[in-house]
Image: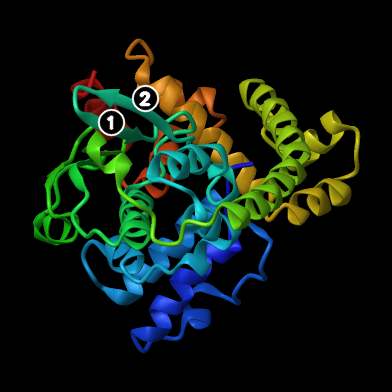
Amino acid sequence: MLAFDAEYTSLLYEYLEAQGLSAESILGESWTPATRISATRWQEMLICAAHASGQPAFGIHIANSLKLRHLGVIGYLLMSCANPLEALQRAQRFNVLISGVNPMQVAIEADQLVVSWPLLHGWCGQLQDEMGLATAVQLCRILSGVHQLVTRVDFVAPYPDSIEPYESFFGCEVRFGQDMPRLLTSIDNLSLPILGADTGLCMLLDEQAERRLQQLAPVDLEMQQLRQQLLQLIREGRPRLADLAAHSGVSIRALQRRLARRGSSFQSLLEETRTHLATQYLADTRLALHEVAELLGYADQATFTRAFSQWKNCSPGSWRQLHLANL
């Protein structure tokens, strides 16, 4: 399931309240711990919060106030690891417990450790990239007590009017218009001590995290099956709730309850699936934009353009140009 953990999203509520804003008026009621929030809903919350705040580089401001408790058991697990390498391995293994969107990948290039998030499920937008990359850096600062850790940061979005807020926070080269979000750091940083290393606690928290991961596995499988069924319906020109329920062998209300239990809805699932398909189709330059709209089940190109612009904060044509420029 493409989702975020509610403990992580509490960071957004707390930040708005600290700025003198009513978080629940802007975002709705806060989510209870141990629930999951769909990626589409999380993106909507970030957009609403950024608009209310009016701050540039809004995601970075939020991440700057990160505490371990916002990451739940994973935050404390990483703090108890013996060294950064062990923490990185666990972060990659349990990444889905915090954010189940694009998986984290790790590689070594020369003397640099490269942590990236390939856009397997499509691009989630600049606000999510800001918060995700800044959260990763802020977490590393908490674990090590060292402020300057990264040597380069990559964003997918085009260059903003000013990169000063980004350079000020990260303290290194910041690039925009890249093919995926990335963080680069010296491999020497893998030998830094972790301030709260505790072998016994680490084993206990690892077991807790593993249990939570196993609990999510069947949910992911079921949501993946629903998404595959919806993909077929979209291709057949029948992207409707009633059709998905019939295809799944359940009533409409039963399907709605099933999605609601997972912090999702039919509309969210449809948007996530269409977003994933849209990026695949747009990457194929043989398809005209009106053909992409038809393949996704839209009545016309204008309707598709409006929807895509809401998902990605840019038009389908602009996304295609940006994608081609980074091939």
* Residue toward you, 173 or 92: 92
* Residue toward you, 247 or 107: 107
Q: Quadrant of the N terminus?
A: top right
Q: Is residue 316 above or below residue 139?
A: above
- The tally of labels here is 2
Residue 145 location (% of width, % of height): 29, 62
Determine which residue is flagged by label 2. 289
Residue at 43% across, 41% down? 88
Q: Is residue 214 left or right of residue 294?
A: right
Residue 216 location (% of width, % of height): 72, 44
Residue at 37% across, 85% down? 18
Residue at 44% across, 22% down? 280
Callout 1 touching callout 2 (CB < 8 Å):
yes
Residue at 29% across, 26% down? 320
Q: CA distance from mark 1 to mark 2?
A: 8 Å
Determine which residue is flagged by label 1. 317
